[in-house]
Amino acid sequence: MMDSFVPVAKPYIGPKEKEYVQEAVQNGWISSAGEFIQKFEQLNADFNGVKYGVAVSNGTVALHLALVALGIGPGDEVIIPNLTFAATANAVLYTGATPVLADVEFDSWTINIDKAEKLVNESTRAIIPVHLYGQPCDMKKIMAFSKKYDLYVIEDCAEAHGAEYNGSRVGSFGNISCFSFYGNKIITCGEGGICLTNDLNLYEKMNELRDHGMSKKRRYWHNSVGFNYRMTNIQAAVGCAQIERINEILEKRWLISKYYNECLKPYGIFQLQSDCSDRKKVCWLYTVLVDLKKVDQSIDDLRNKLHEFNIDSRTIFFPLHQMPPYKNLKKTDQRCSIEISKRGISLPTFEELPEKTIEDICGVLIKITGAL
Ligand SMILES: *Cc1c(COP(=O)(O)O)cnc(C)c1O
């Protein structure tokens, strides 16, 4: 039994975050003008090797803004993976376009392009690869696929800030890439998101659409029906402090996953997301697949038992096609999404998680699976 409840995720708000927030509050720039916003956009663009950033209020609206800027709407189809957070699908639905669901690869847990290809028709306009649980998608294959069928690529990087494919950061491949800074993400603003792009025209479009479609040259002149998707200077203040030490955060998370691996590997009942030589994963939530036949119980059984020991955990996302709003969407076979979802469990992963606690969590997990 743990002395106190161990949550699955928890933001670390350090002295720099507090200092910057205080600065924003003290000088009165608490709304969506103020110097932290542009600084945050620039730091994110630089870190990911992309030219322009448009900070927004959360990751979901980042996806929506990207789709609208690319002109996607009613009658269009957008290919997404079946295994992802619902926001990926919802953002497509908000535009009036239709998401179509491709299964994922069993080893990487990311979108299977061979299966995605079966969904392509004359209405297909874009694909949203999701770098799930810190694993980069096969971007070489995705970029070749998008070229072949003339599709836009919107990268959903919400769970993979800092991950790399062939030496380039995720988020630097697509027409637009979207990030989330929710409290449980790799870096946080409390709530927040950003769209990155190398295309000046798309940057200007998103910059205008985020602010009611208002002209940047002529105030209160509206060029389109835009949105209020602005980020506040207070959010950006937290974000600046976070991204200034992102390398340290990524290193800490990498050590956590390494330590979990060492503790769990000897038992042979846990399967990790694959390591591909062309990809550098980051650790978002430490997540493994359990050999349910060997442990002879369900993930929910295991999670309930962990909870009795004061240890929080999470299931992997449910396959979208199983849930009411998405059950009638066009799809490929969904064998791998189903299998991964049924067998996956996420364990506590946050900056201040001590090694000793990881050891204790693994000890409990081993005990309740009966693997010892
Ligand atoms: C968190 C997340 C989002 C949405 O981000 P919010 O900031 O919560 O709106 C989108 N896609 C994926 C894959 C996510 O994990």
Image (cartoon, rainbow, N blue to C red):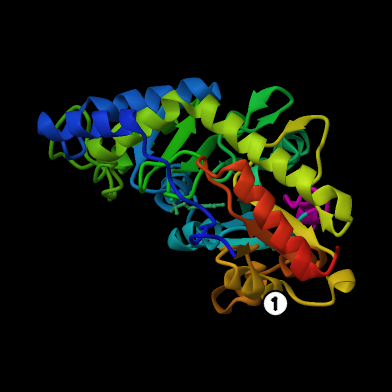
Crowding at label 1, few (<14), some or many (≥20) Cα neighbours within 10 Å?
A: few
Q: Nearer the viewer, residue 194 or 113?
A: 194
Residue at the image point whose x is 66% and y is 24% from the top: 168
Q: Nearer the viewer, residue 273 or 252?
A: 252
What amino acid is found at the position of numbered circle 1 in the picture? Asp
Does residue 332 appear anywhere in the picture? no
Q: In the image, is the residue at mark 1 within 8 Å of ligand 1 by its beta carbon?
A: no
Q: Quadrant of the C terminus?
A: bottom right
Q: Residue 314 lies in what quarter of the image?
A: bottom right
Magenta residues span 105-118
Residue at the image point whose x is 50% and y is 41% from the top: 352
Percent across and percent down for residue 257 are 68, 42
Percent across and percent down for residue 26 are 11, 31
Percent across and percent down for residue 84 are 62, 58
Magenta residue check for 55: no
Percent across and percent down for residue 59 are 44, 48
Q: Is residue 181 above or below residue 329?
A: above
Does residue 248 appear anywhere in the picture? yes
Q: Nearer the viewer, residue 120 or 43?
A: 43
Q: Nearer the viewer, residue 349 or 94?
A: 349
Residue at the image point whose x is 65% and y is 35% from the top: 254
Q: Residue 363 lies in what quarter of the image?
A: bottom right
Q: Is residue 300 above or below residue 258?
A: below
Q: Is residue 121 above or below residue 214?
A: below
Disc 1: which residue: 301
